[in-house]
Image (spheres, rainbow, N blue to C red):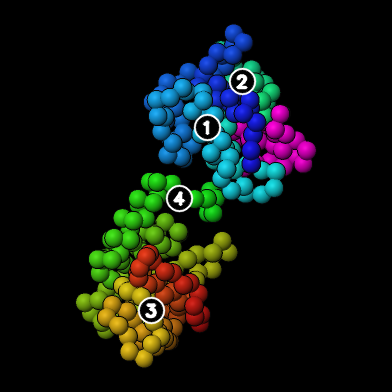
């Protein structure tokens, strides 16, 4: 998506808090506060010391080059920028509804066919005037990684290259599945193999209907292969098949329900390069 330079400069003046036509309805932001503003928008842009409004206009132009979630909808990052800019807590020289600031923003956006408005949640949203399509700032799984995210990805890759299976389970998988809403997450460990019965982890998930699903996980540190002779650091899929068959056929005891149950779904997790490969629902009971 591409905006006219005039529109970009007007939005840049608003973000910088420059006085326009003897009116100032926006917070004044110096160099460090401009960097903080874009950090609040979940970006890693940092002001380089150049002219503030020109730098902001160039930054907005870069943001508009990001993939669009749908036709007639600007990138999610731009929606976050306008939402942060129009935060009602930042009202200046007017009430929290910010009619003056909203009018100035809409005078610029109308040139591009958009309109900003406040919804019932007191957040600012964008509407495409011709189609009445509303842009909602939400995480976009297809957006490019930021520099900070790329650095974290490299750190995770380096950690997985040296982590043992127990470390992969305890420090990565257990916190991950807890965040996803699973309960009773139990790791069998590798010290006593007699307790595994084909599964390194078992856990359960409660559906909105209060029905309970049970999951079993088989975790391997390296890659999975299907060759006749496996290389060092890899696990043969035939071995995985035997362990998953054992997992699905052996009951687990759930002390909270005081009954023995079979797992409903089996997960296979391989921590091979470049990152964790998760195949869910590979086999089901």
Q: Which residue is mark 2?
A: 101
Q: CA distance from mark 4 to mark 2?
A: 32 Å
Query: Where does the magenta region start and end?
Result: 111-136
Point out the frontmost of discs 4 and 2.
4
Name the quadrant containing residue 274: bottom left
Q: Are marks 4 and 2 in contact (CB under 8 Å)?
A: no
Q: Which element carries disc 3, helix, strand or loop?
A: strand
| Left or right, residue 268 beside residue 281 | left
Q: Quadrant of the N terminus?
A: top right
Q: Nearer the viewer, residue 44 or 176?
A: 44
Q: Earlier in the sequence, mark 3 or mark 4?
A: 4
> Per the image, is 133 magenta?
yes
Distance (Cα) linking label 3 and label 1: 46 Å
| Of marks 3 and 4, the one in the foreground | 4
Residue tagged by mark 3?
A: 224
Query: Where does the image place residue 160, in percent across and percent down from the top left?
Result: 30, 64
- Where residue 267 appears, x then y in whole percent? 44, 74
Q: Which mark is residue 25?
A: none
- Local secondary structure at mark 2: helix
Q: Nearer the viewer, mark 4 or mark 1?
A: 1
């Amino acid at each position: 998506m591409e905006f006219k330079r005039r529109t970009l400069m007007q939005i840049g003046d608003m973000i910088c808090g420059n006085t326009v036509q003897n009116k100032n309805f926006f917070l004044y932001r110096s160099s460090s506060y401009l960097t903080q503003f874009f950090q609040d928008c979940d970006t890693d842009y940092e002001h380089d010391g150049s002219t503030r409004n020109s730098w902001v206009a160039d930054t907005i132009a870069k943001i508009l080059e990001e993939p669009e979630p749908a036709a007639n909808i600007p990138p999610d990052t731009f929606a976050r920028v306008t939402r942060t800019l129009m935060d009602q807590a930042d009202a200046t020289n007017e009430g929290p509804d910010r009619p003056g600031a909203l009018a100035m923003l809409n005078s610029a956006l109308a040139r591009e066919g958009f309109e900003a408005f406040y919804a019932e949640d007191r957040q600012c949203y964008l509407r495409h005037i011709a189609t009445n399509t509303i842009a909602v700032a939400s995480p976009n799984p297809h957006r490019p990684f930021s520099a900070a995210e790329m650095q974290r990805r490299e750190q995770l890759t380096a950690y997985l290259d040296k982590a043992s299976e127990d470390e992969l389970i305890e420090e990565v998988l257990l916190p991950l599945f807890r965040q996803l809403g699973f309960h009773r997450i139990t790791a069998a460990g590798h010290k006593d193999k007699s307790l595994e019965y084909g599964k390194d982890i078992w856990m359960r998930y409660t559906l909105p209907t209060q029905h309970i699903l049970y999951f079993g996980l088989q975790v391997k540190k390296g890659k999975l292969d299907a060759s006749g002779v496996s290389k060092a650091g890899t696990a043969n899929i035939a071995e995985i098949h035997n362990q998953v068959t054992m997992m699905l056929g052996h009951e687990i005891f759930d002390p909270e329900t005081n009954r023995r149950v079979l797992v409903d779904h089996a997960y296979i997790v391989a921590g091979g390069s470049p990152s964790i490969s998760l195949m869910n629902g590979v086999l089901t009971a």
